[in-house]
Every structure is written in C-alpha cells, then in structure tokens.
Image: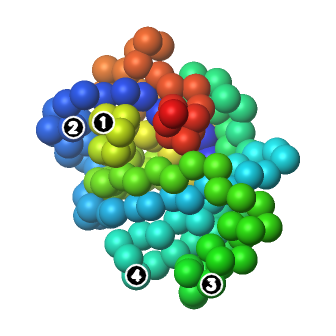
Amino acid sequence: MQNIEIKAEFPDLQLAKSRAESAGSVTHGTLHQIDTYFNVASGRLKLREINGNECQLIFYQRPDAAGPKTSAYQISPVPNPSTMKAVLTPALGVWKVVEKKRELYLHDEVRIHLDRVTGLGDFIELEGVVTQPELFDAIQRKVEDLMDHFGLSAENLVAGSYSDLLP
C-alpha cells in the first residue's frame, strides 16, 4: 500500500480540530497508541497497540523529507501483541517506544491525525491513502490543499518519524 504524508508541529490542537471540522472532515474518535519500534536494516518496523485491544505490525519505507513524501507500507493484524513483542524483542531489539493520543478525522482519502506525543508535544499528520496509482496526483493535491487550510508552512514540517525526534 502507499500514502502521501506530512507531519508538522502544531501547538494548538483545539485550533486544528476547528480547522478539520471547517474543512468538512469527519471525526472518528480518539485513539491511544503505543508504537514499539524495532531495529531493522532499512525502513521502519513497529508494533502498534491501539486502545489496549487492537494491535498491528507495520513495516514502512519513506524518505526523511519535510514536505509531502510517499510512504510504502504493509500492515498485518496481530492477535497476540505480548507474544509478538516477546518474539521480536530478542530477535531485533527495541529501538524506541512512542506513545500518543491521536484524534482521527477523515477527509475523503486523507486521514488527519491530531497527535499529542508523550515527551514531544502536539503535531498534525496528514496521510493521503493511495488505493489506485492513477489517483496519486489528485490525492497529493488534497494533501497540499489541507496543508494550506491548516496554515502549515515549511518551518512547521517534520522530516522523520516521531521515533526520530525522541532522545
């Protein structure tokens, strides 16, 4: 699978919620996520625990660039997170753990994440999900239009992952 994404510092999540709603985005609730990143040779591999009752293993590759970037990813549901963590930890080693509270909005093919990341602060993430290659340009335009709508500028953009920002 593939998406087009940006991440930006956004210190006023109330303002972000207001802008998401004024854009016609639909709220899909609040998620508590714990992402355990494992050491891998390339890309990123994380075990994502969601609200204590759902878990996914996610592998993704994307450039560490501040502007809109393409990310290729694969997601697999994990029925037993503690067993998976017990297998992956000695095999690969844990690199970082990122904990966040995420408010999720959907705007057509774009997922809007309003994130409060433990130890880092508040961020907005836009992920345009590309389900068909011929839609790539249209979805990229939607991400760029939402960047304008939220007032995001180059100095707000973050190049890497939350895991890269943690000490």
Alpha carbons under labels 3 and 2: distance apart? 35 Å
The residue type indicated by label 1 comes to: Asp
Q: Secondary structure at mark 3?
A: helix
List x then y, in percent, for residue 93. Answer: 71, 58
Q: Is residue 5 visible?
A: no
Label 4, residues with CA under 10 Å away: few <14, some 14-19, many ≥20: few
The residue type indicated by label 3 comes to: Thr
Which of the labelled discs sits on residue 83, or is there none?
A: 3
Report the residue at 31% width, 20% height from top.
Answer: 151
- Judging depth in this view, the residue of 97 and 144 nearest the camera is 97
Mark 1 or 2, closer to the camera: 1
Question: If you read the primary sequence from the N terminus, does the residue marked by circle 4 or circle 2 appear first?
Answer: 2
- Looking at the image, residue 120 lies above or below residue 88: above
- Judging depth in this view, the residue of 121 and 135 nearest the camera is 121
The residue type indicated by label 4 comes to: Asn
Residue of label 4: 53
Question: In this image, 83 relative to 59: left or right?
Answer: left
Question: If you read the primary sequence from the N terminus, does the residue marked by circle 3 or circle 4 appear first?
Answer: 4
Residue of label 1: 122
Mark 3 or 1, closer to the camera: 3
- Judging depth in this view, the residue of 82 and 106 nearest the camera is 82
Alpha carbons under labels 3 and 4: distance apart? 14 Å
Label 2, residues with CA under 10 Å away: few <14, some 14-19, many ≥20: some
Report the residue at 62% width, 73% height from top.
Answer: 85
The residue type indicated by label 2 comes to: Leu
Which of the labelled discs sits on residue 13, or is there none?
A: 2
- Looking at the image, residue 41 lies above or below residue 70: below
Q: Secondary structure at mark 1?
A: strand
